[in-house]
Image (spheres, grey):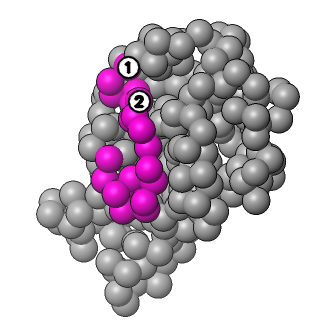
Amino acid sequence: MSDFPSELCGIRAFVFDVFGTVVDWCGSVANELQLKSPGLAEDWESFAKEWRSGYYETTRRVAAGGDGPANVDIMHRQILDGMLESPRWQHLAPLWDEAKRQELVLIWHRLEGWPDATKGLYALKSKAIIGTLSNGNVRLLVDMAKHADLPWDVIFSGELLGSYKPNPKVYLGALHHLSLAPNECALVAAHIFDVRAAASHGMKTVYVLGRDVELIVLRGLRGFQ
């Protein structure tokens, strides 16, 4: 642990937000939509962002005790169907049948990591436990890890822990299963609401500054250059 800056001394596990922090969800989804829909001149980046916006709205509602699916694949399909009923995207609905829509949902299983993600995670893995702390469902996170070469030691998922972030169940559940005190575990995230929620339960936190892009934390830990 001597390679860590003083603020992170004593950390035995780093758990990561995944979407946006470790992987480029927007670019990955937009690129795959374009590849899977040849001949369609659409603003696929806007489509991806609207799809993701529905995810944020739903997970926040469920985290606060409202209704919604516990599985993000189901959630993504519901949001997609709703988008295809909207005035902006309804022209795509006749082109995308049941099989096509299911295929599109699986795009979220194949998101690409940011350029420094894999190298950084392997370096960190040699010094501490690393895992996800994500709202994504288990199969999605497993498939993504295999696709993008993300070497997690453990996968913690909202599906497993009974809610979505920022519900306390998610943070406290990860600590319970790791058998760690809050100050022995750090959340790494590019989303300030996530960092603040983890800190409220006594966890150490690493806020990835900037464009919601690279794992800046890994450049800031000595010995990871």
In this view, 43 is above or below 4: below
Of labels 1 and 2, earlier in sequence is: 2
The label number, if any, that marks residue 126 in the structure image: none
Q: Quadrant of the C terminus?
A: bottom right
Q: Is residue 69 left or right of residue 188?
A: left
Q: Secondary structure at mark 1?
A: helix
User: Badge 1 is on which residue?
Assistant: 161
Front-lying residue, 81 or 208 = 208
Q: Which stretch is magenta?
A: 142-161
Seen at 15% across and 63% down, the residue is 99
Tally of marks: 2
What crowding class fits label 1: few (fewer than 14 Cα within 10 Å), some (14-19), or many (20 or more)?
A: many
Q: Inspect this view and state whether residue 150 appears.
A: yes
Residue lying farthest to the front in this orientation: 2
Q: Amino acid at mark 2?
A: Phe
Query: Residue 57, how many percent across, how many down?
Result: 52, 34
Seen at 76% across and 28% down, the residue is 8
Q: Nearer the viewer, mark 1 or mark 2?
A: 2
Query: Residue 219, how many percent across, how many down?
Result: 77, 53
Q: Report if residue 25 lies within the magenta region.
A: no
Q: Is residue 46 left or right of residue 104?
A: right
Q: Is residue 145 left or right of residue 94?
A: right
Q: Quadrant of the N terminus?
A: top right
Seen at 77% across and 45% down, the residue is 221
User: Badge 2 is on which residue?
Assistant: 156
What crowding class fits label 2: few (fewer than 14 Cα within 10 Å), some (14-19), or many (20 or more)?
A: many
Seen at 37% across and 45% down, the residue is 141
Q: Secondary structure at mark 2?
A: strand
Cβ atoms at labels 1 and 2 below 8 Å apart: yes
